[in-house]
């Protein structure tokens, strides 16, 4: 088999979605290239801390995708899913790590969570604002995502929700959070935080912008 890096997005066979094992797959298929990782990942999935997540997700999806719901099937928003997941897991204390520019949106989220009987801890990215000179970087005062994460760790949150953290900030926030963490809003200043729109626009009027020579 050719030694090619996995390129699932270029696959035209999609055997993995059909379980038809007799289908010939491309040489870059990771399932074929790394069979030992398949076995290892399955064993890791069985660990108690991972099974808790798997089982909660399965229970949530059974409710979300219930065929008896008719037109209401698949009607849950991401906020609905987060609350259902947290409820199934018995999570009571939820953390919100938000960008200061999305404080209004984070407040709406906090209000929704509190009305659904969750305890909420929220922290802005500018909490403990950093002087760039203190870390050897030029520019103006910038955010402190590590403090955001460590504050939520100290508060003992069960689940953290990211609301519009910038690139870099989200990476450091995820790296330092101890609790399970999930994104709700991803920062995109140009597209009203609708990041997938850039992918759609790359096929139309903005094609030249994203497909440089």
Image (tube, rainbow, N blue to C red):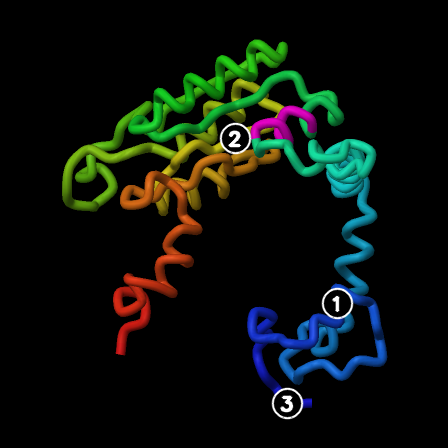
Considering the numbered disc 1 on the image, is that residue within a helix, a strand or a loop?
Answer: helix
Whether residue 81 is in magenta: the answer is: yes
Left or right, 85 with respect to 151, comes to: right
Q: Which mark is residue 16?
A: 1
Residue under numbered circle 3? 2
- The picture quadrant where one finds residue 210 is bottom left
Horizontal side, residue 23 vs residue 182: left or right: right
Marked residue nearer the N-terminal end (3 or 1) = 3
Q: CA distance from mark 2 to mark 3?
A: 41 Å
Local crowd at mark 1 within 10 Å, few (<14), some, or many (≥20)?
few
Q: Main secondary structure of the magenta part?
A: helix
- Residue at position x 39%, y 35% from top? 164
> Label 2: few (<14), some or many (≥20) within 10 Å?
many
Residue 176's label in the rendered image is none
Residue 49 can be seen in this image: no
Relative depth, front residue between 51 and 78: 78
Pointer 2 or 3: first along the chain: 3
What whole-number distance in Å separates the C-alpha atoms at marks 2 and 1? 31 Å
Residue 40 in the image: above or below residue 76? below
82 part of magenta stretch: yes
Magenta residues span 79-84
User: In the image, is 173 to the left or to the right of 178?
Assistant: left
Where residue 132 sits: x, y (%)?
20, 39
Q: Position of residue 103 (x, y in %)?
A: 35, 22
Task: Give the structural element (helix, strand or loop) at label 3.
Answer: loop
Percent coordinates x, y for residue 163 in the rendering: 43, 32
Residue 97 appears left or right of 50: left
Along the viewing direction, whichever of 141 and 103 lies nearer the viewer: 103
Please tell me the numbered disc located at residue 161: 2
Residue situated in front as seen by the camera: 142 or 102: 102
């Amino acid at each position: 088999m050719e030694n090619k890096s996995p390129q699932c997005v270029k696959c035209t066979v999609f055997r993995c979605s059909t379980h038809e094992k007799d289908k010939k797959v491309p040489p870059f298929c990771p399932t074929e290239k790394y069979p030992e990782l398949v076995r290892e990942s399955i064993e890791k999935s069985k660990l108690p801390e991972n099974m808790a997540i798997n089982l909660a997700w399965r229970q949530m999806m059974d409710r979300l995708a219930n065929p008896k719901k008719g037109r209401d099937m698949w009607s849950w928003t991401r906020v609905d899913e987060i609350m259902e997941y947290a409820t199934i897991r018995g999570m009571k204390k939820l953390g919100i790590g938000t960008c200061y520019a999305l404080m209004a949106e984070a407040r709406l989220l906090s209000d929704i969570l509190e009305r659904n009987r969750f305890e909420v801890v929220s922290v802005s990215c500018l909490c403990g604002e950093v002087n760039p000179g203190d870390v050897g970087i030029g520019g103006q005062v910038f955010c402190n995502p590590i403090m955001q994460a460590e504050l939520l760790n100290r508060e003992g949150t069960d689940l953290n929700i990211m609301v519009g953290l910038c690139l870099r900030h989200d990476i450091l926030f995820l790296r330092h959070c101890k609790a399970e963490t999930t994104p709700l809003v991803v920062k995109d200043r140009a597209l009203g935080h609708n990041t997938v729109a850039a992918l759609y626009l790359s096929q139309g009027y903005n094609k030249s912008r994203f497909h440089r020579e």
